[in-house]
Image (cartoon, helix red, strand yellow):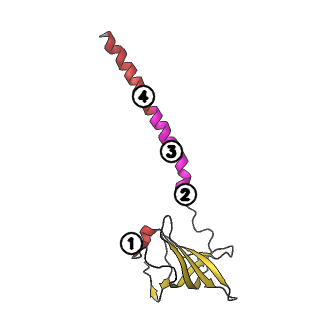
Amino acid sequence: MEIQRLRVPIWRRFVKQKMLSVLVVAVGLLVVSAPAIAHHGVAGYDLTKTITLHGTVTKFDWSNPHCVIHMDAKNASGEVQNWTIELAAPSLLNRMGWSKNAMKAGDDITADVHPSQNGAPVGISGTITFQLKIVINGQPLPTR
């Protein structure tokens, strides 16, 4: 009987220490991962202004967290600029009818975008709340 009484408290202390260790690690992981779920938003874009770009797709990235179109388009003075256009997440675009094969390098593109506020050749054309018009080789891609 005496031996059993001694073993139970030792076992309980061991389990409590392991549970405490697991709890500390879990809280630590949550604290460290909190910045990873933050989102940059659309603050850098002028959502009151929409411009239409026409040019050629140079690259289409179908990846998380956002799909991105890289395109060459001429500016007002006729110089070619390489634009980067941010879209929604692949899962959202997929639900709208897009696929990773929606466009490829060399395709003719016309895209409505909200330009960046700082004048850089960067724009946003889609998020979870909106999708602007994009036409590839004369065919409009689906919007909501």
Residue denoted by label 4: 16
Residue denoted by label 3: 29
The residue positioned 43% from the left and 33% from the top of the image is 19
Label 2: which secondary element = loop
The residue positioned 37% from the left and 23% from the top of the image is 11
Asked if residue 60 is among those painted magenta in the image, a careful observer would answer no
Residue 20 screen position, x and y as percent: 46, 32
Q: Quadrant of the C terminus?
A: bottom left
* Viewer-side label of 2, 3: 3
Task: Tell me the number on the disc at residue 38.
Answer: 2
Q: Main secondary structure of the magenta part?
A: helix
Mark 4 and mark 1: span between their CA atoms? 47 Å
Q: Which amino acid does the dot numbered 4 rest on?
A: Lys
Q: Are marks 2 and 3 in contact (CB under 8 Å)?
A: no
Residue denoted by label 1: 95
- Residue reaching furthest front? 106
For label 2, count other residues whose C-alpha is less than 10 Å away and answer few (under 14), some (14-19) or many (20+).
few
Magenta residues span 20-41
Direction from residue 112 to residue 95 in the image, left or right: left
